[in-house]
Image: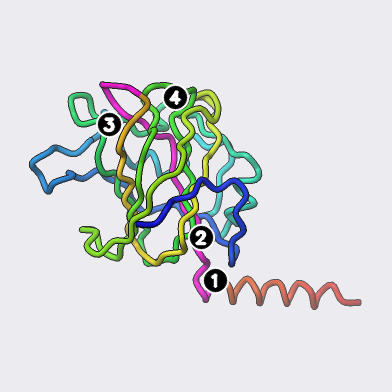
Amino acid sequence: MFALLSALATCHAQAGVILMPDSAYTTSIDGGTTPPMGSLTGFEEFQTVNQSGLTTPYMSGVTDFDAYIASAPTHGSSLDYNSWRSDLGSPTVGFLDFDLGATFTIESMALWNYGGNHEQNVAVFDLKVADNPDFTGATSFTTDVVNTNTGPSTAVLPQVFSITPTAGRYVRMEILANNGSPDFTAIGEVAFEVVPEPSTTVLIGLAAGLFARRRRP
């Protein structure tokens, strides 16, 4: 099991782009005996991957991850219906899974927690990356420090967690504890840093070359 680093000043071997997962959903930790965390009506899992509540939108698969995070985009977790909240009466810990839609080399994850140091914030989690939705043979990463107060719940700043670059389509956030709430757990938004696909990198390079040619006298 690898360590998952809270990345504030991490140098990447290759600049990554920010990726919005295709979907998010909770699953049972034991195949069905224990119910999944579920969601409150209006606060479904997809709210974590649709950019709702972000002050600055991004273009998935195109926008530079580091540049975007450096711009300090905030998320209004407590505004409108912009966050995921686990269902009342369901476990406050468990699996929150993300389908990226295709296989990518994943370098890090950006988390906009619920914020404000509220007890519903995620406090401890591990990550798993796999090429299948059952997470058979998944690569696991343990967390370092989760900040439950990166800003008020109306303007939450992201925290970035870097991992050893790993190829996969599915990412599991195994939530091990919240900040003390017995009722529900909440998250604002999640996005991933991935290495651009070769075709994308080539297109960007070609565009840069054409631009340079046009600027020549």
Q: Could you classify mark 2 by the number of other residues whose Cα lies within 10 Å: few (under 14), some (14-19), or many (20 or more)?
A: some
Q: Tag on residue 45?
A: none
Marks 3 and 4, how far apart in space?
Answer: 14 Å
**111 sits to left or right of 68:** left
Q: Which residues are magenta?
A: 180-199
Image coloring type:
rainbow
First-in-chain label (2 vs 3)? 2
Query: Residue at the spot x=30%, y=65% of the render?
Result: 131
- Mark 2 vs 4: CB contact within 8 A: no
Query: Can you give x and y, in whole percent of width and height, for residue 204 in the image?
Result: 63, 71
The quarter of the rendered structure image containing the N terminus is bottom left
Marks 2 and 4, how far apart in space?
Answer: 27 Å
The quarter of the rendered structure image containing the C terminus is bottom right
Mark 3 or mark 4, which is nearer to you? 3
Query: Can you give x and y, in whole percent of width and height, for residue 3 in the image?
Result: 42, 52
Instruction: For mark 1, give the secondary structure.
Output: helix
* Residue 165 included in the magenta stretch of the image: no
**Residue located farthest toward the right when viewing the structure as drawn:** 217
Pointer 2 residue = 61
Instruction: For mark 2, give the secondary structure.
Output: loop
Q: Could you classify mark 1 by the number of other residues whose Cα lies within 10 Å: few (under 14), some (14-19), or many (20 or more)?
A: few
- Mark 1 vs 2: CB contact within 8 A: yes
Amino acid under label 4?
Ser
Q: Tag on residue 200?
A: 1
Pointer 3 residue = 86
First-in-chain label (1 vs 4)? 4
Mark 2 or mark 3, which is nearer to you? 3
Q: Could you classify mark 4 by the number of other residues whose Cα lies within 10 Å: few (under 14), some (14-19), or many (20 or more)?
A: many
**82 sits to left or right of 62:** left
Pointer 4 residue = 78
First-in-chain label (1 vs 2)? 2
Query: Residue at the spot x=52%, y=41% of the render?
Result: 159
